[in-house]
Image (cartoon, grey):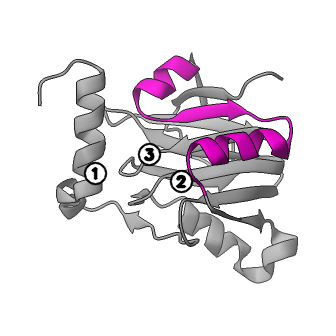
Amino acid sequence: RLIMKAYFYDNAEGDQREDHDSGSNVSVDYLSRIGVTYHRCPSVRDVNSVANARSYKNRDEIIVSPDQMGPAYEEKVRMFFNEHLHEDEEIRYILDGEGFFDVRNLENEWIRIRLEKGDLIILPAGIFHRFTTDTKNYIKAMRLFKDEPKWTPLNRAPQLENNAHRKNYLQDRSVQVGMIT
């Protein structure tokens, strides 16, 4: 596989860890227009190149699986699937396993991005998104940070539309697609 798979989420009832593939694919170029950056990184050396170019100074690793998290696993996966944004970029490099990042496009539709070993994704500050493992219930990821490691989700609520990072995200996208704000 040379590139990740992205598509419109089908919004069907059922386990969040299922594919939920609508059959309508989304290109890397489309993802780029909504601010999502994708890299295929066969080695950590490739990740280091991206990290250096973007001034990421810190990193850690996380394993999301029942074996690693024990009885808290199901609760954690549900928490990760709550729609939220961050005030910093979210950068993930998949070391092993598979999972999904769902991101909202400008029309408020879900785009599902399937990631597996060797995929690196960068979500811009201010984009609404969520994460889940797939049905194998295992993913190991490297998290990269510009400064000290932090992961502060702001769950979607009406007042977040006034968040400076959300406003900047929308303004940047509007300019990029030629919309008037």
Please say if 80 is above or below 72. Answer: above
Q: Residue at x 27, y 62 (%)?
A: 157
Q: Amino acid at mark 3?
A: Pro
Is 121 drawn above or below residue 74 in the view shown?
A: above
The quadrant in which the C terminus is found is top left
Q: Can you give x and y, in whole percent of width and height, for residue 51 in the image?
A: 65, 48
Amino acid identity at mark 1: Arg
Residue under numbered circle 3: 124
Asked whether residue 26 is drawn in magenta, I would say no
Q: Secondary structure at mark 2?
A: strand
Which residues make up the magenta segment? 28-56
- Packing grade of label 2 (10 A; few <14, some 14-19, many >=20) is many
The answer to whether residue 81 is visible is yes
What number of labels is visible?
3
Q: CA distance from mark 3 to mark 2?
A: 7 Å
- Residue depicted at x 47% and y 41%: 103
Q: Position of residue 154 (x, y in %)?
A: 38, 66
What residue did someone put label 1 on? 166
Which tag, 1 or 2, sits closer to the chain's start?
2
The residue positioned 46% from the left and 49% from the top of the image is: 129
Q: Residues within 10 Å of mark 1 (few under 14, many from 20)?
A: many
Distance from the alpha carbon under mark 1 to that under mark 2: 14 Å
Q: Position of residue 110 (x, y in %)?
A: 45, 37
The CA span between labels 1 and 3 is: 10 Å
Are circles 1 and 3 on residues that touch, CB within 8 Å?
A: no
Check residue 90 in the rendering and tell me which mark sits there, or answer none. Answer: 2
Q: Amino acid under label 2? A: Glu
Residue 95 x %, y %: 83, 50
Can residue 117 be seen from the camera position used here? no
